[in-house]
Image: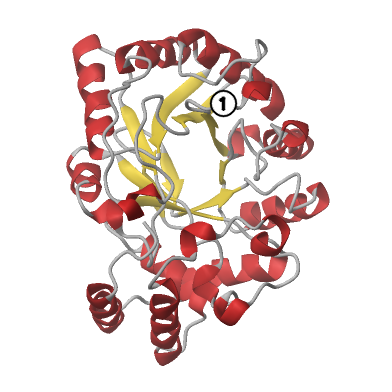
Amino acid sequence: MQKRRLGRTDLDVPVLCLGTMMYGDQIAEADAVLQMDACSDRGINFFDTAEMYTVPPKPETQGESERIVGRWIASRKARDKVILATKVAGRSPAAYMRPDGGETRLTPDQIRFAVERSLKNLQTDYIDLYQIHWPDRQVPLFGSLRTGYTHYEDKGVPIDETLGALGELVTEGKVRHIGLSNETPYGVMQFLNAAERGGLPRVASIQNAYNLLNRVFEAGLAEMAIEEDVGLLAYSPIAQGALTGKYLDGGNPPGSRKALFDRLQRYETPGADDAIRGYLAIAQQFGADPAAFAMQFVTTRSFVTSNIFGARNMEQLETIFSSLEIDWTEEMEKSVNELHGRIQNPCP
């Protein structure tokens, strides 16, 4: 399994990372165990979760993904073999996630509470990569850029304060490295500047959506990722399954995320179907499975540290594994970029 350096740390991670956000609802624990075993056997020892998961978020399953991963690690005695990444929730009205029933914020007290709970859930005394799931300040997120940029004056909890709290956790050995998620170029640079000013931990990574339908990371963030060594942990590389083509023409397969939760709106935008058909045709042209093709596009980007995938069953997992066998060629790159030039980022 090819590995890449995580930021400016001494930690090398595999180019594929197992995303576990569906564990505990769409994916039962028994199936999750099979997935973690299979990934471990393949050298994919980088697992990503979050205090908020499983998805869709709700009080009765909050933290279940972490608990499932924790039970697997304990049963396999695999803590020293696994690179664990989890996240603390940014600002939200999810009152059930905090003991005082208030909104989630990136304050020192809340970060401390969240990390202690995650450590307990994961049955470990340290987390390899602790990430801020989304900012405390208000920024356009999760597809809202389709309607243009909106500026908000509310800056939220000061970044220096949040970073200071994370620095204490690093000093205590409860967290090895820190990262961001769903961030902007401005936000990343503010964290980097705050670290330099205060002698605080430097963010090692950024976890944002990136796929053939959403390449907005390339405008600003990609340059930052390379120049500042804050590599992308790309999520949604197959666009929640949309890039397989299974949702075209009103498709809604039983057991799919759309059928279960109706949460595919980010990939049901004007121009999306035309782009999907185009990428399916390109994959077919090169004799590749569409999902594997979409995966390998992401994995081969110079600014990507690791490509986070989710799989509903073992068949899908094998397709993910097979993506690494695709020799990404100049012809593939040219075909993808030509279509992207005609239909740019229909699902930002």
Tell me the crowding category of disc 1: few under 14, some 14 to 19, or many 20 or more residues within 10 angstroms, Cα based: few
Q: Nearer the viewer, residue 332 or 62?
A: 62
Q: Is residue 9 above or below residue 22?
A: above
- Residue drawn where x is 74% and y is 51% of the image: 32
From this view, report whether residue 191 is shown above or below residue 8. above
| Residue at the image point whose x is 32% and y is 18% from the top | 159
Position of residue 313 in the picture relative to residue 289 (left or right):
right
Residue 101 lies in quadrant: top right
Question: Which residue lies at the image location 25% right of the left edge and 75% below the top edge?
Answer: 337
Mark 1: secondary structure: loop
Q: Point out residue 319 in the picture as x, y percentages from the top left corner.
A: 59, 72
Decide if residue 239 is in sight here: yes
Question: Where is residue 94 drawn, in percent x and y?
Answer: 61, 27
Q: Nearer the viewer, residue 31 or 337?
A: 337
Quarter of the image where one finds residue 75: top right
Residue at the spot 54% in from the left edge and 21% down from the top edge: 104
| Res. 303 in view | no
Tell me the residue that label 1 is attached to. 93
Q: Quadrant of residue 48?
A: top right
Q: How many marks?
A: 1
Q: How is colour applied across the structure in the image?
A: secondary structure
Q: In the displayed orientation, state which residue is furthest to the right.
A: 30
The kind of residue on which mark 1 rests is: Pro
> Observer-nearest residue: 11 or 335?
335
Quadrant placement of the C terminus = bottom left
Nearer-the-camera pick, 184 or 94: 94
Q: Is residue 309 left or right of residue 214?
A: right
